[in-house]
Amino acid sequence: MCKSPSTRVLSACGCERCATRIPNFPKTAAGIASGALPTAPMADRFLRGCKGDAKKAAHVLTDSLCWREEYGADALRDESEPDGAPRAEIIQSYYPTALHTRRDRKGRVVWIERVGLCDPSIASAKRVYQNAAGQWEDGPTAWLRCHVRLNELAGRQHAERVVIMDMQEMNSGHVSSAGIALIKSMIALDQRHYPETLHALLIVNAPWILEKAFAIIRQGMDPVTLGKIKVLGSTTNASVHSELLAHIDVADLPDFLGGELAGCCPIHPRLRAGSAPVDGEATTTIDAGATRVARAALPAAAAELWVRSSAACAVTVDVIVGGAAAVTAASVGPAPQCFPLAAAAAEAEVELRVTSTNRMRSGAIFWTLDGVSEIEWEVE
């Protein structure tokens, strides 16, 4: 058992490699020279992460301090990097993740990732975000920088975090070799630079395909970290729900995890999928060959109408705004389609007319319009 930081002080590593490397990072060198680095909480985390081996902990910690300056981790923590928030907004349209606004029962940060609804192409995309320097970052680079930013922001709030990964709608496309490689890079980064920050990782709505992926991902993981991971079934299962409630009050648990709180970790419209409404989508069933009509008051400002269908259900969409056709016979399937609507005169009505082109099977349609809730639509 490592001693507490108040009784055991960890200094920077004095090995030849570290002694040669430290001068390349002036802020780190100055912090070490003044005694400001490493901080006591940081030293304690690295000591515990290295199982009390002070020599190893000093080396790993010194390497991490240099990495922090090289990577710009402090700027991400302090929100002084100009790309931090804009990059996160772009990544959110690929990979929905967020620090929850509520804490767990012990005040820890709750970190939520809706993995099953992510776009797995992020793991191999070549041009995802153009930074302030004009350079394009590929998917893995941009995603990892966002991950580091969340680690830094979480660390400002609490030393530990509870991570919930929701695998709802996960399929074989999410377990590509590129995707697994990216997850393993993230795990290696966390174990190297953020030891002893994970209190628990709860993987919920886990499908069978995850077993194969997890068998690969867990290779090389620290046994202590593995002991904090629980792979659970559906959140509709009473035992899974109880496990979540052991960490988070039902009033603070997101509704998509069986709780009462709406609006948590929102999904970009283009990522919505599955046979159930996502994040307040309006929905109705549609019989084979039938037509359904939905009407609502159109917001005064320009808005985006997103429409999708359930699997194996193909439809055409017509949109009428203020009596004039805005969209005509557009084909829509399970992949969400966006129809931008211009600003309209006051009290204008939008009519969504959906016709099934499948003569054999019924299905469901789902849609959202900026500024209009699901209960404001009249469906016939």
Image (cartoon, helix red, strand yellow):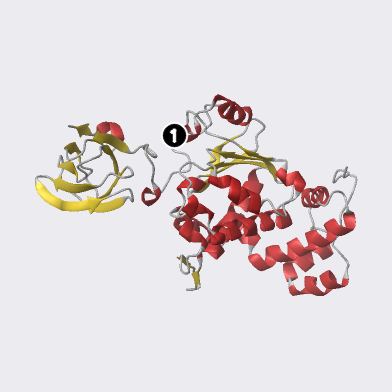
Closest to the observer, 288 or 345? 288
Q: Confirm whether residue 80 shows in the render.
A: no
Question: What kind of residue is marked 1?
Answer: Ala
**Quadrant the C terminus occupies:** top left
* Residue 166, position as x, y percentages in the image: 52, 41
Rendered residue at 62%/49% (across/down):
214
Q: Which residue is drawn at 64% across and 43% down?
A: 157
**Vertical position of residue 75 compared to residue 228: above or below:** below
Residue tagged by mark 1?
262
Image quadrant assignment for residue 183: bottom right
Q: Position of residue 71 (x, y in %)?
A: 64, 65
Q: Judge whether 297 appears above or below 246 on screen.
A: below
Q: In this view, does 265 lie to the left or right of 71?
A: left
Label count reads 1
Q: Seen from this angle, which residue lies furthest left?
A: 323
**Which quarter of the image is occupied by the N terminus?**
top right
Q: Position of residue 2 (x, y in %)?
A: 87, 45
Q: Is residue 197 visible?
A: yes
- Which x, y percent locates residue 343? 20, 50
